[in-house]
Image: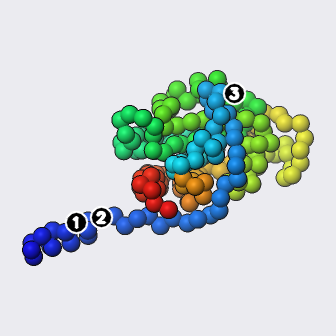
Amino acid sequence: MNRLFALLFALAACQKAPPELDDMGTLPAWQLTDQAGQPVGSATLHGKPWVANFLFTSCPTSCPPLARATAQLQERIRAWQPKDGAALTQIVSISVDPETDTPERLTQWARDYHRDPRLWSLATGPYEAMETLVVGGFMQPILRKDRQPGEVPPVTPTPIDTAHSLRFVLVDARGHIRGLFEQDAASLAKLDEALQFLAQGAK
């Protein structure tokens, strides 16, 4: 009996503590279009945790490293997905240049990063809907030199020097924002751990 107790105690001690996750508010209902021309949004993602980030295909500086980090995260989460059926989580990269980034362009761009369609979706749509979601919903910046905050001129393709968030945003199965994560390996490991925790049905 003493040996059994000691074994159980040792196993419990080896278990990782659940990650500390904030509750940063609920995303509004939203819908954009994925790389296949199908709807992607709060309705299609409801019921599983997911991760968002923000990029655009013509960005020459900050977006390629972010895309490579996304591919690395994809490989981490692939390791614990079921062999068949729906994935337990999803990555959604939202284009901040939807005027340029059509579904077809996004699909072609993602081939360089070995996107797994089961795990990683790309989203585009009307500029105003995207901007409202990113800035008002995710509370992440989009800074364009050709537009003032709140200004609504005719929408043109996003300039390549546009500043935008380079973080990963973790969203739980209820649509609550649970954390912001950087691109480095340690942050990706923590994000992967948090996704696994939330995928197990944790609140």
Q: Secondary structure at mark 3?
A: loop
Percent across and percent down for residue 112 are: 52, 28
How far apart marks 2 and 1 lie (CA) works out to 7 Å
- The residue under label 3 is 102
**Residue nearest the viewer, comparing 46 with 59:** 46
Q: Which of pointers 2 and 3 lies earlier in the amino acid sequence?
A: 2
* In-image side of 10 versus 76 (left or right): left
How far apart marks 3 and 1 lie (CA) works out to 50 Å
> Against 151, is 35 above or below?
above
Q: Which of pointers 3 and 1 lies earlier in the amino acid sequence?
A: 1
Residue at x 76% of width, y 31% of height:
99
Residue at x 45% of width, y 60% of height:
202
Q: Is residue 142 visible?
A: no
Q: Amino acid at mark 2?
A: Gln
How far apart marks 2 and 3 lie (CA) works out to 45 Å
Q: Secondary structure at mark 1?
A: helix
> Against 18, is 98 above or below?
above
Percent across and percent down for residue 18 are: 40, 65
Q: Which label lies toward us, 2 or 3? A: 2
Residue at x 39% of width, y 41% of height:
81
Percent across and percent down for residue 44 are: 60, 41
Q: Is residue 181 visible?
A: yes
| Quarter of the figure with the N terminus | bottom left
